[in-house]
Image (cartoon, rainbow, N blue to C red):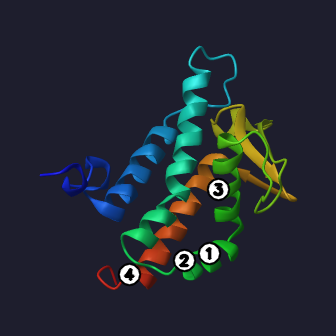
Amino acid sequence: MGIGTLLPSIHKSEGWKGQYQRMIRWFDKFKTTDPGHFESPSIHDELDILYACFQNIFYLKDWLHYDAKVEKKLIHNFIAEHVELQLCRDICNGTKHFRLTQASVEDDFTIIREYEPFHKTFGTKPYKVVILSGGNKFDLKELAFRCIELWEIFIRKNIPEIA
């Protein structure tokens, strides 16, 4: 058996469904982190999990195109209809490249820690981590969850075996 006839790599063995499950696993890891606790000794690990979570969420699009054979135009139009997925794209590319040259929302988005003044009343943390971009503000954990919801809607609508 020559090199060109090897079986697919393990990372491709489950196709788009494998990437979907990887996305969910990264989100599960992200949910348990506290990337707003800037003094934490594990802050870099927690930020890495945040970035990896959004990268795996966004790049499901490639798996849907190449493995599930969904048309690129259909995927791009869906992303264009949802600011959440556009922000997800910007986070992916912004954490991969130093400068965004073709941002979906804004090339200079900001991820910050926002103070929660009523945290004692509600029994929550005194801060949350948000993204500010193009006049939008999203809690990052809520944004990740919403992006996953959007992909689930897209998959149910566009992949016949799931419908």
Residue type at tag 3: Cys
Q: Which residue is found at the position 25% from the left and 55% from the top? A: 4
**Residue nearest the viewer, comparing 101 with 81:** 101
- Tell me the mark number nearer the camera, choosing from 4 and 2: 2
Residue type at tag 2: Lys
Q: Secondary structure at mark 4?
A: loop
Q: Which mark is residue 88?
A: 3
Asked if the residue under mark 1 is in contact with the one under mark 2, i.e. CB atoms within 8 Å, the reply is yes
Q: Is residue 16 visible?
A: yes
**Residue nearest the viewer, comparing 114 with 19:** 19
Q: Can you identify the residue that label 2 sits on? A: 72
Q: Can you identify the residue that label 1 sits on? A: 76
Q: Secondary structure at mark 3?
A: helix
Q: Which residue is found at the position 79% from the left and 44% from the top? A: 99
Q: Residue furthest front?
A: 2
Distance in Å between CA atoms under marks 2 and 3: 17 Å
Q: Which mark is residue 132?
A: none
Asked if the residue under mark 3 is in contact with the one under mark 1, i.e. CB atoms within 8 Å, the reply is no
Q: Can you identify the residue that label 4 sits on? A: 159
Q: Quadrant of residue 48?
A: top right
Residue type at tag 4: Ile
Q: Quadrant of residue 64?
A: bottom left
From the top left corner, tell me how far across and down residue 149 is, in percent. Answer: 51, 66
Q: Is residue 34 visible?
A: no
